[in-house]
Image (cartoon, rainbow, N blue to C red):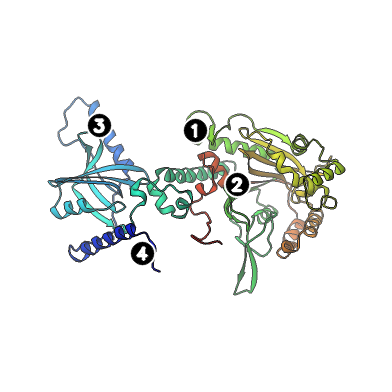
């Protein structure tokens, strides 16, 4: 079945009408509907600003203008409204900066161009130029003395241009969502600005941006299932990286003092409102830093981003929550949260095992005590105030194999996670740089894996060799960029801040 045959009849009729118009333009009128290079374009917002500035200058001047005071602009955009009224045609164009009306008078254009303007469809991409003025109703517009079609749209817009509203359809057809829903374009402009600001913030702290391999021979740096691939020329199994950590630490061994990377990670896991298998992380490492220096860095970064998106103060709304980034972040220990949620100390092994049994956890009698604590901690997370950015500190060392144990409480690690609005946003460590202890931690971690996980896990001997060369004491940090953008733009689904999120095949069960 062809694409046309599978579409509703009404939509197929609209497409057929557009194709007939395309054929007439090309073969009868000799119009090239696919356009050419155009220099000197202004955005629609710039054209609007030209008029506002010219009007302001005219009001401030005591002298009458010697010539037409209206500025001239040439713009391009997609037709989102259109009305032909005899000798006048009005249309609204849209580009990434906003909307602007274009008014076309039969008296101002060659007859062929005027007829063309009267016959364009919603979705066509056009170029118009002329003086920027106003209509009788006071609407800022371009009074076109030049008009051209530079791309004929063959697909009718959704719902007669009232918007693409279904959430999955918006993610699946992002190229439509971006032009029919202006808030989508605004959100991704905001994402770009915030990521750029993050880079400037890090550079201002004297961190060097680097790039590390996306394909790795050993899946390491985090406890997650990787995507596997294969390099044919080298006959080498590889994994898409789940984290850049072990390569960034190699750079500290090599002598770089402060490094960061903003790039993609890949985890072969579930898809949800807060998870996408391909996501953006920033990882940071600072020689001679520690967990505390990373917490200060995280708090300062988020406050800087909040100030960027807020006109007054640093309170950002996320759903029903008003989150204040301007005051000091809260701090609570992992153990305190656990005891608050369950009424038992996480250090009391017998009580933890009894609790696990009552919750129906598998292997509650035989599983490692600290792994049971980890399994039970999700309920404790729910007690964190979603309106207060909160650092959870002092994680169990067993579940933190890359972080340094506390000298006075070796069962705990110098590790912290930041929670905001019920989401984990960042993870910070005082990094483990003892090669023997690191080997023991990795070995212990591997021994506890299930068979299906053990098939893609192995010791990263090269990383362990690097630690033997010597890595300075360091602080490390991972920040979920997508989730930060969710918070700063008030987007409650990760799909809304990723241009092309992973989706099931349309109409399929995969």
Where residue 376 appears, as percent x and y from the top left, is 75, 44
Please name which of the two marks, 2 or 3, marks the residue nearer to the observer.
Answer: 2
Is 3 above or below relative to 472?
below
Give the labeled residue for mark 3: 55
- Whether residue 290 is visible to the viewer of this picture, yes or no, is no
Where residue 84 appears, as percent x and y from the top left, is 20, 47
Q: Residues under labels 4 and 2: Cα distance?
A: 41 Å
Closer to us: 329 or 123: 123
Closer to us: 471 or 237: 237
Sequence-first tag of 4 and 3: 4
The answer to whether the residue labelled 4 contacts the one labelled 3, judged by CB atoms less than 8 Å apart, is: no
Give the labeled residue for mark 2: 480
Q: In the image as oriented, which residue stretches furthest toward the top?
A: 62
Sequence-first tag of 1 and 3: 3
Where residue 322 appears, as percent x and y from the top left, is 56, 31
Q: How many marks?
A: 4
Please name which of the two marks, 1 or 4, marks the residue nearer to the observer.
Answer: 4
Q: Residue at (71%, 46%) from the top-left corner? A: 474
Sequence-first tag of 1 and 4: 4
The answer to whether the residue labelled 4 contacts the one labelled 2, judged by CB atoms less than 8 Å apart, is: no
Q: Residues within 10 Å of mark 2 (few under 14, many from 20)?
A: some
Q: Which mark is residue 4?
A: 4
Q: Residues under labels 4 and 3: Cα distance?
A: 50 Å
Q: Residues under labels 1 and 2: Cα distance?
A: 21 Å
Does residue 335 appear to the left or right of 169 in the view shown?
right
Give the labeled residue for mark 1: 310
Dot 3 lies on which element? Answer: helix
């Amino acid at each position: 079945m062809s694409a046309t045959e599978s579409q509703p009849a009404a939509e197929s009729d609209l497409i057929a009408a557009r194709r007939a118009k395309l054929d007439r333009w090309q073969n009868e009128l000799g119009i090239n509907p696919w356009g050419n290079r155009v220099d000197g374009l202004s955005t629609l917002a710039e054209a609007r600003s030209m008029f506002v500035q010219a009007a302001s200058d005219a009001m401030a001047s005591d002298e009458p203008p010697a010539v037409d005071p209206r500025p001239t602009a040439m713009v391009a955009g997609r037709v989102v409204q259109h009305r032909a009224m005899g000798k006048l045609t009005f249309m609204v164009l849209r580009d990434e900066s906003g909307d602007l009306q274009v008014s076309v008078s039969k008296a101002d254009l060659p007859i062929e161009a005027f007829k063309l303007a009267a016959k364009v469809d919603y979705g066509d991409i056009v170029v118009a130029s002329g003086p920027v003025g106003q209509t009788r109703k006071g609407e800022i517009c371009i009074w076109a003395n030049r008009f051209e079609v530079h791309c004929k749209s063959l697909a009718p817009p959704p719902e007669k241009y009232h918007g693409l509203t279904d959430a999955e359809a918006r993610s699946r057809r992002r190229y439509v969502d971006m032009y029919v829903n202006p808030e989508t374009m605004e959100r991704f402009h905001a994402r770009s600005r915030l990521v750029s600001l993050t880079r400037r913030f890090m550079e201002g702290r004297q961190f060097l941006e680097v790039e590390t391999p996306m394909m790795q021979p050993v899946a390491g740096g985090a406890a997650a299932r990787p995507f596997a691939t294969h390099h044919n020329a080298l006959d080498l199994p590889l994994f898409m990286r789940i984290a850049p950590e072990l390569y960034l630490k190699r750079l500290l061994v090599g002598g770089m003092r402060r490094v960061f990377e903003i790039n993609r990670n890949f985890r072969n896991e579930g898809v949800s409102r807060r998870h996408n298998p391909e996501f953006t992380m920033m990882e940071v490492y600072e020689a001679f830093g520690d967990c505390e220096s990373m917490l200060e860095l995280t708090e300062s970064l988020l406050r800087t981003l909040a100030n960027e998106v807020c006109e007054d103060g640093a309170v950002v709304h996320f759903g029903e929550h008003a989150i204040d980034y301007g005051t000091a972040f809260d701090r609570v220990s992992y153990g305190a949260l656990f005891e608050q949620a369950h009424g038992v100390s996480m250090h009391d092994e017998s009580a933890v095992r009894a609790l696990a049994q009552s919750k129906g956890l598998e292997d509650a009698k035989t599983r490692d005590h600290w792994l049971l604590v980890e399994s039970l901690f999700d309920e404790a997370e729910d007690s964190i105030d979603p309106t207060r950015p909160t650092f959870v500190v002092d994680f169990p060392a067993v579940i933190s194999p890359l972080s340094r144990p506390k000298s006075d409480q070796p069962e705990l690690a110098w590790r912290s996670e930041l929670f905001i609005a019920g989401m984990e946003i960042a993870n910070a460590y005082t990094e483990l740089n003892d090669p023997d202890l690191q080997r023991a931690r990795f070995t212990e971690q591997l021994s506890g894996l299930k068979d299906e996980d053990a098939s893609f896990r192995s010791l990263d001997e090269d990383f362990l060799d690097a630690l033997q060369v010597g890595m300075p004491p360091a602080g490390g940090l991972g920040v979920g960029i997508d989730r930060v953008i969710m918070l700063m733009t008030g987007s409650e689904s990760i799909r809304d801040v990723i241009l092309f999120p992973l989706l099931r095949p349309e109409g399929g069960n995969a």
